[in-house]
Image (tube, rainbow, N blue to C red):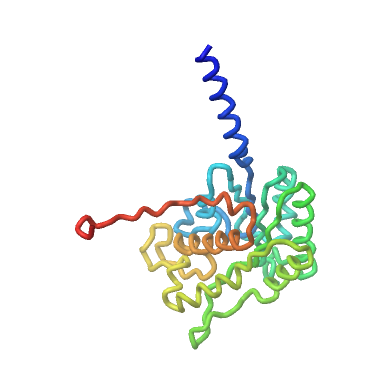
Amino acid sequence: MAHRLFTTVAAVCLLALLAFTGAPPAAIKVYLIGDSTMANKEEKAFPETGWGMPFRYFFDETVTVDNRAMNGRSTKSFLAESRWQPVAAALRPGDYVFIQFGHNDEVPTKANYTPEADFRANLVRFVTETRARKATPVLLTPVARRKFDAAGKVEETHAVYAGLVRSVAQEQKVALIDLDAESLALLQQFGPEASKLLFNHLAPNEHPNYPAGRDDNTHFSELGARKMAQLVLADIRTLQLELADRIVKREVKKTVDAQAR
């Protein structure tokens, strides 16, 4: 009798504790759509790294990052190749879509060039269809290229298309991560020479994938990709997105020198 009573009380206490702590957060997906600066890379391209690659490691087990970004894509080609439609169909309530285009949309000589009006319309479509599935869209301005003037001041190369992203975000009341402005500031902090470390700059024979070397001011090194991902993570916190609660919180252990005690 006493044992049964103890078991009942223990069960009630456990239920009360579970009710107090609440259910664990539901599993969600974060979809990344965009271009080569965000995309996963094949082994033959290493050490070139898209910032979406390290980004996925910063979240707890309730988050799956599904990186659909592809090299060379614009909003136009992403839609024309039916890369967006499967994402929209798969979205579930609580999911996120991070949308970062502009690098290829803005260049008139590229096959994937997207005129300004079409670029705006395509962004609105991504936002509208994401919301229709009760998921959360997040717009990102295109990440900066490495370009400095003779005085060592970093130069803006996305002025028009980054501005279009900002205006769509304002009009549609969408969370905005101004990765263009923030990455420009980061490049200026590093300066003309040290900023090469953030990009796929390689001397001849430094890496077997690039025996002739590489001077790439668009695509990132592993360090650069991680730095860009950290900018995005900081904005997730600043914007107070629910996703911020799922960023892994790593405890820093402090060690004390025994002689100092």
> In the displayed image of the protein, which residue is found farthest to the front?
2
Q: Where is residue 193, by image quadrant?
A: bottom left
At a point 48% along the width and 56% down the height, the residue shown is: 45
At a point 67% along the width and 47% down the height, the residue shown is: 95
Q: Where is residue 93, by image quadrant?
A: top right
Residue 52 horizontal/vertical position (percent) = 56, 55
Q: Is 46 on the left-hand or right-hand side of 82?
A: left
Q: Is 16 on the left-hand or right-hand side of 193?
A: right
- The one of 74 and 120 positioned closer to us in this rendering: 120
- The one of 250 and 117 positioned closer to us in this rendering: 250
At a point 70% along the width and 71% down the height, the residue shown is: 161
Q: Where is residue 118, by image quadrant?
A: bottom right
Residue 100 horizontal/vertical position (percent) = 65, 61
- The one of 72 and 20 positioned closer to us in this rendering: 20
Residue 215 horizontal/vertical position (percent) = 47, 70
Judge whether 46 appears above or below 63 on screen: below
At a point 40% along the width and 62% down the height, the residue shown is: 211
